[in-house]
Image (cartoon, rainbow, N blue to C red):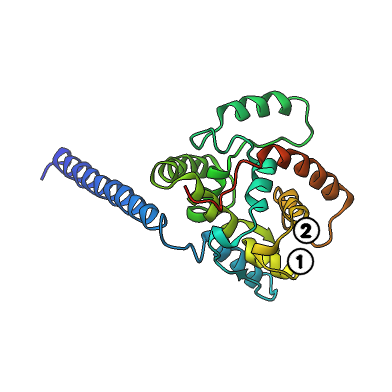
Amino acid sequence: MSKKKIIGKTISFLKKWILRLLIFFFVSTIFVTACYRFVPVYITPLMVIRCAEQAFAGDKLILHHNWTPLDNISKHLPQAVIASEDNRFMEHNGIDFEAIKQAKKENRYRRSPRGASTISQQTAKNVFLWPKSSWLRKGFEVYFTFLIENIWNKRRIMEVYVNSIEMGKGIYGAEAVAKYNFNTTASKLSRSQCALIAATLPNPRRFNSARPSNYIIGRQHKIMSLMNMLEQYDFNKKK
């Protein structure tokens, strides 16, 4: 067999397998996303990665997470995270281009660059991807954001977000942070407690909502002021 024929057959073989892999990827991710529209998300890649980091460091494994329906979570928590993380959550389709433009302008003068990830993007990252930022992850993040925005609805995105977001060392979701940081349940979190939790979200392993610094208390007050404009968003009321 000539060298050209061997190369041709190899290319044809690779094309077939690449096509099969792409089909498998799209079918499987759409299927899993559709399942998560109804099925609780009990474990995420981030939880697994954090446990692996603890194991490699020789630390005690800590993983606190209890899935809780949105109806059993304080109505103030969604309002607080919208105020803190994504005040156009109900308006955009997953990617907030206005926030991206604003962040680019502000980052010219800021020491620490400000991100513009939406709650939808953070949910996609938490549920399907890994935490370390890269262009590859960003590409997958956009894809999964598109999926959840079109297969789920805003209420479901919020429900998964407040159940899967990292809220402290080994603490994930509203029920766990309510228990371990405030000695209460997710349904009984007060307005101020929800604002404290939201204030730590940019870096929940550095900032502790149970023992807030002056910086976090300042953020809490700003978030509570913004929450006054978000009273119409009560996700506990099913539509």
Nearest-to-viewer mark from 2 and 1: 1
- Residue at left 58%, top 44%? 119
Q: Are marks 2 and 1 in contact (CB under 8 Å)?
A: yes
Label 2 residue SS: loop
Residue 182 is labelled as 1
- Residue at left 27%, top 47%? 23
Label 1 residue SS: helix
Foreground: 103 or 96? Answer: 96
How far across and down, in percent of the image, does residue 141 sit? Answer: 49, 43
Which tag, 2 or 1, sits closer to the chain's start?
1
Q: In the rendered structure, which amino acid carries the disc numbered 2?
A: Ser
How far across and down, in percent of the image, does residue 6 sit? Answer: 17, 44
Q: Where the N terminus falls, by quadrant?
A: top left
Circle 2 crowding by C-alpha within 10 Å: few under 14, some 14–19, many from 20: many
Circle 1 crowding by C-alpha within 10 Å: few under 14, some 14–19, many from 20: some
- Judge left or right: residue 33 versus residue 137: left
User: In 3D space, how far apart are the residues under numbered discs 2 and 1 (Cα atoms)?
Assistant: 9 Å
- Judge left or right: residue 150 versus residue 82: left
**Can residue 170 be seen in the rendering of this structure?**
no
Residue 145 is labelled as none
Residue 209 is labelled as 2
In the displayed structure, 106 sits above or below 93; it is: above
In the displayed structure, 210 sits above or below 195; it is: below
In the displayed structure, 85 sits above or below 67; it is: above
How far across and down, in percent of the image, does residue 234 sit? Answer: 59, 47
**Can residue 113 be seen in the rendering of this structure?**
yes
How far across and down, in percent of the image, does residue 204 sit? Answer: 72, 55
Q: In the rendered structure, which amino acid carries the disc numbered 1?
A: Phe
- Residue at left 55%, top 37%? 90
Asked which quadrant contains residue 223, the reply is top right
- Judge left or right: residue 64 versus residue 195: left
Q: Looking at this rendering, what residue extends furthest in the left direction?
A: 1
